[in-house]
Amino acid sequence: MTDRPTLLLLDGHSLAYRAFYALPVENFSTTSGQPTNVVYGFANMLANALRDEQPTHVAVAFDVSRQTFRAEAFPEYKAGRTRSPDEFHSQMTVLDDLLAAMSIATLRVPGFEADDVIATLATAAAADGFRVLIITGDRDVLQLVSDDVTVLYFYRTASEMIRYTPEAVQAKYDLTPAQYPDFAALRGDPSDNLPSIPGIGEKTAAKWIREFGSLDALVERADEVKGKAGEKLRDALDQVRLNRRLTELVRDVELPLGLGDLGRGPYDLTAFTRLLDELEFRNASLRQRLFAADPGGGREEAAADETAALRGRELGAGELAGWLTGRTGVLGLAADCVWVRGSGGVRRIALASEDMAVSFEPEALTEEDDRAFAAWLADPERPKALHDVKSLLHVFPDRGWRIGGVAVDIAVAAYLLLPGLAAYGIADLSARHLGYRPPEEGAEGLMVQARAVLDLAAKFGPELADTGMDAVAREVELPLSALLAQLERDGVFVDDALLRELEKQFENEMERATDRAAEIAGRRFNPGSTKQLQEVLFGDLGLPKTKKIKSGHSTDVDALTWLATQTENGMPEVLLHHRDQSRLRMTVAGLIREIGADARIHTSFQQTVAATGRLTSTEPNLQVIPIRTAEGRRIRQAFLPGEGYEALMTADYGQLELRIMAHLSKDPTLVAAFESGEDLHTTMAAQVFGVARDAVTADMRRKIKAMSYGLAYGLSAFGLAKQLGIAVAEARPLMDAYFARLGGVRDYLEHVVGEARGTGYTETILGRRRYLPHLTSDNRQRRETAERMALNAPIQGSAADIVKIAMLRVDEALREAGLRSRLLLQVHDEVVLEVAPGERDRVEEIVRDRMTTAYPLSVGLEVAVGSGSDWDAAAH
């Protein structure tokens, strides 16, 4: 590093295009349908550059249009380029918003290209003693390289860069940077539609410039170039001269900003955090790198003010009890905890009142302090504002600490108020709502966090009351946090040996599938390589072409499934089997990796992730274990009752979403179908197809089942057609016939969308909201995506509400009955329990009663219960 100021210049469009084509747009979009691959890739590159180069000044230059002085001089300039895709254009304003929130200057000058703006700034900065770095994917900028100017050139992906100094340019081309535009004029540039000299390649062009010293000298002495090459050169001299004028970058563009305007300033943290949340950037590493690059340290003046105003101090031995005495208002609490695979501890705790904050190490507490803190923490009459109660309950009980009197859990409150945010950490919420990010390390940082928790609670508490969701927070989510923490602490016992045996079995199946694929192809190849798959499927075997993607033709599961129906060649089926076995092996490997020292898996139940209110699990994800396949059942056989327990029990709601649909829509046909007690889908199929129940075929029942469940997910005619493997022209009349019989369902779905368009949100049976601002968007894709969410949210969210209530009621009843049996897991609409000897009948009675009465649906709730020696045997 150097003491000289450093100016970082970025070619905005060049880097945006690199990101767009490096990251598949289908893998990078928000739930509302906004593509994000450009912004994500650009942000990732920018975060790395800010971290690695530590610039004092930054600017991003963008092209304005193709109407530049170059196009006026040569109308064919860049004429061969196709219009950028809409998915690219829709992200450019978002990229501008990101850079503005990061206080990074952007420049666009009509009539000039981004390269000219960069050349002007680089020239001025170098003259002023700056060290200049240029990040680009355009080689024309190499002419700017000097002892003061370095070009970082992307050459393969958005993360691989060549660092071009004068020595590096010389080593690459055997030319100086000043000679590069002469060489480029001879070489031409297909991307800019600048013609080359026919039959003259880069090696010859570079040789001529080295031999003659410059293009001017070569032109002047063109007669000295012998043979056919000389004839070609002389025939193209006019074009070469024009190329040279067009490749020369302008270094004196009149700019709206000067070097003094490009100094790095602190982020607008509120705008920046909200944008990351709207873009649904959940990647923790990217967020951390972006926030770490904030020149204001993520704190700005507000954070400094908070620190100064806190009058914070570290408490010594014997001081905590006295500090707590007489404090009657809400206190904010922040803790530095660690929890990994069933074990952990508390390293430091901070408490904040309105006028001061303190911190202490639990290990340094005297007995009197410990008793005083435990009494305050457990006292329901002494209100506390906390962040993520569930994480605290992993470790606090080990110290004998119980938590009572929670006024607001700011993580839960923020989740209820704005479901679907990318992150709910203290720093993220503070940045979004308070305008600063508390320091994340040290005693002082923890005290600022505690004050932020207090301030956020003061904001979120009234908002919960205003929206009517305070009851959901108080009666469902907060008690559930405690229950989930207990489930995570307890974990579930697994048979390590069986899991390792299954992992080997799936590996062997993958190898057999690889061998079989090699037999069919006539050569060995890697089934996991898209490029090799494309060569084999569409080249060697000549199979029908699938959907076109950037790298050729798709080889994903949908494509292979389609191919299996289009050919008698066995390759697609073999590849699908390989994919399936690979996925199963990864699932089992993930389970093995998470086994704790107690031989139990302690999954993490994510309470603030799914916008619908559903719980998810991670580390490992237990929701990906197949239910209906033989392999999935084998994996479930590895989940066993632990020592002191005799069985596992499962309880699963039957047709929960459809029962909620019947309850909410009050459709008489659907309600009657449930009340009949007969097979729902057969009864519905008879109604829709107008036949007797005994005339309903398996195919009829399958179509109606897909239709009924699909409606709860906002299924379209296109989606139904894809799911059933039929034409859209057949799916649409099927939907029409369905709605003709179930007019109440149709009217309900229309009402849900219409009401949400007016209010901006949907509600579940408990009043849990999901906000959908894109329902009134001018962008059709985003609007239609929001409409599907509006159809989905009340039903899925209500299902989540009911499952959560059921879990709480079952747990409460087990404890009230004095039973040792306990809840272990929750997966989708199923709960799993560990049953103690002699308690099976009583536990089943409690489970059936509490789950079927969790919420008074007009068509009732139905629960299937089973028990056995493992998770699979407990199926019902």
Image (tube, rainbow, N blue to C red):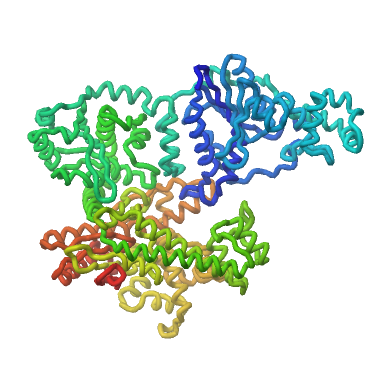
User: Which residue shows up at 31% across the image and 31% down it?
Assistant: 441
Quadrant in the rendering for residue 183: top right
Residue 398 seen anywhere in this rendered image of the structure:
yes
Percent position of residue 628, x then y: 39, 70
Nearer to me, 85 or 318: 318
- Which x, y percent locates residue 710? 44, 64
Residue 76 seen in render: no
Residue 238 percent across, percent down from the top left? 86, 30
Position of residue 342 relative to residue 670, above or below, is above
Q: Residue at x 50, y 65 (%)?
A: 511
Q: Between 505 and 683, which is closer to the camera in this rendering? A: 505
Left or right of 253: which side holds 853?
left
Residue drawn 63% across the image and 26% down it: 165
User: Eyeballing the image, is 746 above or below 123?
Assistant: below
Along the horizontal axis of the image, is 528 left or right of 819?
Answer: right
In screen coordinates, is 50 left or right of 639? right
Nearer-the-camera pick, 849 or 821 = 821
Name the image quarter holding the C terminus. bottom left
Q: Residue reaching furthest left? A: 368
The answer to whether residue 427 is left or right of residue 691 is left
How many numbered marks have been drawn onto this rendered protein structure?
0
Residue 696 x, y percent position in the rendering: 44, 81
